[in-house]
Image (cartoon, rainbow, N blue to C red):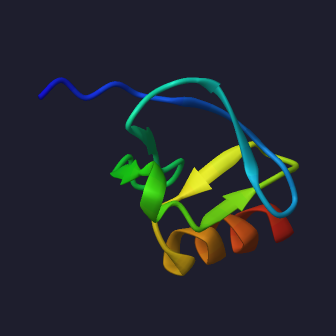
Amino acid sequence: MIKKKAKLKFKHNYFEIVEEGDYVLCAISGKEIKLQNLDYWNVDLQEAYFSPKEANARFKEKKK
């Protein structure tokens, strides 16, 4: 099975698929996130996060 990285446009309560794919990469850890498991992202930064841990790390980083 060939996996392809998707390109998304993050909105406040959903995301639009710009380019079809199976996964995106976490902006903090670089881990692959299957689209069906994608729950955390930042609309302003247009970044995806693997878990609340990574999302919180980015929030703290930007707060400084």
Task: Judge from the rendering whether residue 59 lies leftward or rightward of residue 6; answer left or right.
Answer: right
Quadrant including the N terminus: top left
Above or below, 7 against 53 in this view is above
Residue at 52 percent of width and 60 percent of height:
38
Q: Nearer the viewer, residue 58 or 51?
A: 51
Q: Is residue 47 visible?
A: yes
Q: Residue 55 lies in what quarter of the image?
A: bottom right
> How many numbered discs?
0
* Residue 9 found in image quarter: top right
Q: Quadrant of residue 56?
A: bottom right
User: Where residue 14 sits in the image (x, y, percent)?
Assistant: 76, 56
Give how far across and how far down residue 36 sits, in percent: 45, 58
Q: Quadrant of the C terminus?
A: bottom right
Measuring 87% from the left and 60% from the top, which residue is drawn there? 12
- Relative to residue 51, is residue 50 depicted above or below? above
* Residue 64 showing in the rendered view: no
51 and 20: which is toward the camera: 20
Q: Position of residue 4 (x, y in %)?
A: 34, 25
Relative to 38, 47 lies left or right? right
Nearest to the observer: residue 28 or residue 16: 16
Q: Residue at x 54, y 47 (%)?
A: 27
Please state if 5 lies on the left or on the right of 10 as rendered.
left
x then y, percent, for residue 29: 40, 55
What residue is rendered at 38% in x and 46% in y? 30
Answer with left or right where residue 1 lies relative to residue 53. Answer: left
